[in-house]
Image (spheres, rainbow, N blue to C red):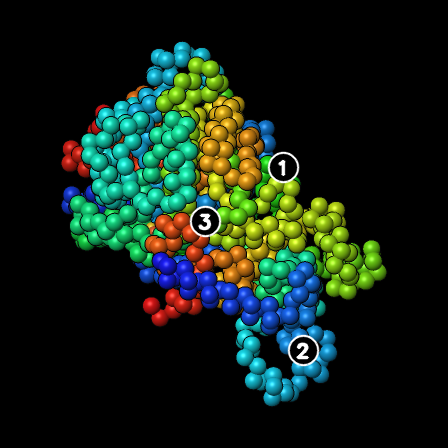
Amino acid sequence: MSTKLPKVPAVIVGMGWAGGIIASELTKAGIKVVGIERGKERTTNDYLMGHDELRFQHRTELMQDLSKETITHRNDPNMRALPMRSYGTFIVGDGVGGAGSHWNGQTYRFLPYDFEIKSLTEEKYGTNKLGSEYTLQDWGITYDEIEPYYDTFEKMAGISGETVEMYGHRSNPYPTGPMVKTPTFELFEEATKKLGYHPYMLPSANLSENYTNPDGISRSACQYCAFCENFGCEYGAKADPVVTVIPVAKETGNLDLRTHSNVTRILNDGTKATGVVYVNTITGEEFEQPADVVIVTSYVFNNVRLLLNSNLGTPYNPETGEGSIGKNYCYQVSAGATTLFYEDKAFNNYAGAGALGIEIPDFAGDNFDHSDVNFIHGSGIRMTQYGNRPIAINQVPSGTPSWGAEFKKQSIKYANSTLQVKSQGASMPHKDNYLDLDPEYKDAYGMPLLRMTYDYTEQDKELVKYMSKVTRKIAEKIGADHYETTEEQATFNVNVDTNTHNTGGVIMGADSKTSAVNSYLQMWEAENVFVIGASAFPHNSSFNPTGTIGALSYRASEGIIKYLKDGGGSLV
Amino acid sequence: MEESEKYGLDEKGSSRRKFLRNSGVAAGGVVVGSVLGGLIGFGGEKQHQAPKTEHEHAAPAANPNAALMFFTPDQYQTTIAATERIFPADENGPGAADLNVAIYIDHQLASPWGINAKDYMLGAFYKAEATQQEQVRILRKDLFLLGLKGLDDYSGNKFDSKFTSLEGEQQDEILTEFENGEYKLSGVSSSIFFDLLRILTIEGAYADPMYGGNKDMEGWAMRKFPGSRMNYNNEVVSKEFIELEPESLQSHMGH
Ligand SMILES: Cc1cc2nc3c(=O)[nH]c(=O)nc-3n(C[C@H](O)[C@H](O)[C@H](O)COP(=O)(O)OP(=O)(O)OC[C@H]3O[C@@H](n4cnc5c(N)ncnc54)[C@H](O)[C@@H]3O)c2cc1C
Ligand code: SF4
């Protein structure tokens, strides 16, 4: 039996970046909001003993508790999907702040090309560049339309960066200047310039200088402490919902934040939602929270799973291509890389920050001609310095055993004497890559788990091959005693592949037949349900997703406020 | 910057010399168990546990954390021997035995992680395809003990001896076969145990010393890792390598 609570104007499911932004915008506009979060409350106090590699990186303290729920995975529809029982490197956030508490902070915009990828690709390369099994779609919004929202997000977070000519136009420069250029970045810069490329410092949410945002939130500059990716920032230097949008929402008095509360279903009559059901994860009590608007910001996986478990929207059918919930799940391809080994040079690679990096834009999007290659889009080619931690990073030349005297000798010898030129590439949707409900496995509350059917495509493999050669070329220009290049993209394995950039499943578009939400992330099939996150991306670009999630969250907030004011209706 | 550079180098140099002096590890020498002389009075000879000499009471090395909460003394000895082969003492510095890696493993297996508290353990455990994660029902603490027993059983079969009594090369031979999954533990491939043993060894060498391993931060010192300092504003822009004395989380207490 669930306890029915008094109705509120808006309920938000999940208090990460998307949920936090919506909460702050709605509460500032005077709207009463209930924010429901399955994990715990967090403040910077939680980060004070944070420099603990074992606890936070390898025991994944801040991540989703897999004993309660996980995903299942198979590479193709003929396999039986099996649950990810423990974490490899594929991690999901949890608690107030979501993955925004332990992200790196690399904060990009997508390209003008991304938003109109289908039209622009066909215009330039014809309709057969990729086969019809690639379900490429325009986003239903242009870069010019989304630009002001990027600007708002960047000002709120205080993004540190420099303008890049080869990317979309900016109405304003970044609010703070770029991070420091390390000596190894100078090597990368010199080499790439000699090759005719255009290096720039990564846009970073680790503040390069003290900053006060338009909400009046002041934060101090990054200390390059190197416990950043997978860790919370005790200085508040890293933009995190916990030190930005959530305190703003709390300050209004309009946010009722409920932690340890796991939403299991969205109540609805097929065309409209009436509220949500959630379980207190500590006591086991069940509650029903009625609301005028239901805002789903529970990350890609649960955004899809909650809709499917609630019978909201039409599930995607890979046989017919009809339906949209679960469609166009994409990832990213980052296999192509070259490692540089040095015999008698050491670098201060124990120092760093999550978004400290340098990159070239020359191989991103359609910045180079694709007439003679078998793929579209591209990669950022980059060198980063996050801080090498000793359990995680043990680079040894190939052929070195993985244990014993030789392993120890080589891993210590090269502990401070390797560099890497890496790539992070775009991921195109394919009709056989999708999300649905697992027929067998359930979560701790008895609800079906999400099943991922995914493998890298031919497009991905071609892209990786090409980009790995670019990394090699740059590495050789930098110069080292020994190089090792990964040239091929292996088969997808949920416990091996490192990338936290999952996208799709509740995609946006201009057409209700081929997409799930409109350009305000309002569901076509249920006008008072807004589903926000990277789940809305019809494909994944080569850039990290959160800048675009932030921009879409600001746009959705605008739509939700209008919807509540107008008393309903489609926003487009 | 120059100051910290100088400070770091001098401090580090002396601490490394001190290590070599204290531990008596000769370059390349294998010292399984030797450093534990003071620790393992209970290692089978019960009477040694009894009244301590004054000298032992005064020993500055007494570390209340270096005691067993999970292993039996025999299991502990096997763990010391196996981890030392994975991460041996050499001219860089101490190996797993001297770093208290087996203490670290003991404590980890006694923790919620040892009983897979945050892993998904529901539903059926089917055989995984090569591109899927191994589906292991056995809890880590049980898997580790199965593996230790397997090491002894297999050593018995092959060399008619316990694992701890074998020569280093023989131990390597056994470990290699375990790594390749050539020995079948009940219900699971030996390679799954080996992977656990290997990663726990690396963790025990390099995790914060509060977890019981990485004794005196010597694991970090070997690779010139400064531990958990609060800022690297100077180091991050320095063209010279700056070697800093490691600091552990203990140094953050009382902030
Ligand atoms: C280690 C790491 C590094 C990253 N680095 C970068 C980077 O450098 N740049 C970048 O752009 N992106 C990065 N990302 C990705 C980034 O963190 C995410 O894109 C972003 O946090 C997504 O925001 P979100 O609000 O959609 O989801 P999240 O931040 O994941 O928040 C979702 C929230 O919903 C809650 N929730 C889920 N299900 C339920 C439920 N049923 N009931 C109640 N609450 C629920 C979760 O607990 C969570 O708090 C990184 C991610 C990780 C893990
Ligand atoms: S590297 Fe900078 S932003 Fe990251 S946690 Fe440390 S101080 Fe914070």
The residue to which callout 1 is attached is: B130
Q: With A155 as the anchor, is A409 left or right in this view?
A: right
Reading the chain from its start, which is encountered first: label 2 or label 1?
A: 2
In this view of the protein, can residue B11 be seen by the observer? yes
Q: Residue at x 31, y 49 (%)?
A: A238
User: Residue A347: which numbered mark, if any?
Assistant: 3
Above or below, A432 against B70 in this view is: above
| In this view, the mark in front (2 or 1) | 2
Q: Chain of mark 1?
A: B
Type of amino acid at the residue the image marks with label 2 = Gly
The percent coordinates of residue B102 (x first, y second) are 62, 64
Q: With A495 as the anchor, is A46 left or right in this view?
A: left
Q: Residue at x 78, y 61 (%)?
A: B166
| In this view, the mark in front (3 or 1) | 3
Q: Chain of mark 2?
A: B
Q: Chain of mark 3?
A: A
User: Residue B41: which numbered mark, if any?
Assistant: 2
Q: Residue at x 61, y 83 (%)?
A: B56
Q: CA distance from mark 3 to mark 2?
A: 44 Å
